[in-house]
């Protein structure tokens, strides 16, 4: 496995609105996730792929220990709302 500190890990896949909420919580602890929206990117490129309204959030692997408790609490909160 690579020891590259810039290597990323996917932490969330789901609706854009929920991804924005998780992003905000991570921003509060000075972590800036990378958002990937394949559907929107496809539209901009002239062809649609991916699932509308679904995005993926990534963070650097070295940020995961700091982010894990925030991610876990967020996922628990989302489960309780369903």
Image (cartoon, rainbow, N blue to C red):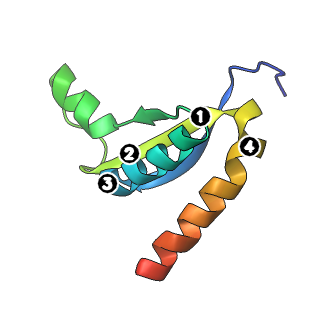
Q: Which mark is residue 66?
A: 4
Left or right: residue 3 compared with residue 12: right
Residue underneath mark 2: 55
Q: Earlier in the sequence, mark 3 or mark 2?
A: 3
Q: Tell me whether the residue at label 2 lies in contact with that at label 4, contact meaning CB atoms closer than 8 angstroms.
A: no
The alpha-carbon separation of the residues under discs 2 and 4 comes to 22 Å
The alpha-carbon separation of the residues under discs 4 and 3 comes to 23 Å
x, y percentage for residue 45? 20, 21
Q: Is residue 54 above or below residue 40?
A: below
- Residue 38: name its quadrant: top left
The alpha-carbon separation of the residues under discs 3 and 2 comes to 9 Å
Q: Depth check: 78 or 47 in front?
A: 78
Q: Which mark is residue 17?
A: 3
Q: Earlier in the sequence, mark 2 or mark 4?
A: 2
Closer to the eye: label 4 or 3: 4
Q: Is residue 30 above or below residue 7?
A: below
Residue underneath mark 1: 31
């Amino acid at each position: 496995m690579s020891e590259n500190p810039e290597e990323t890990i996917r932490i969330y896949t789901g609706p854009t609105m929920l991804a924005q909420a998780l992003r905000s919580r991570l921003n509060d602890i000075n972590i800036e996730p990378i958002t990937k929206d394949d559907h929107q990117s496809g539209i901009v490129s002239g062809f649609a792929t991916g699932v509308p309204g679904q995005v993926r959030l990534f963070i650097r692997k070295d940020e995961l220990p700091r982010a894990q408790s925030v991610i876990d609490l967020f996922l628990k909160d989302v489960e309780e709302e369903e």
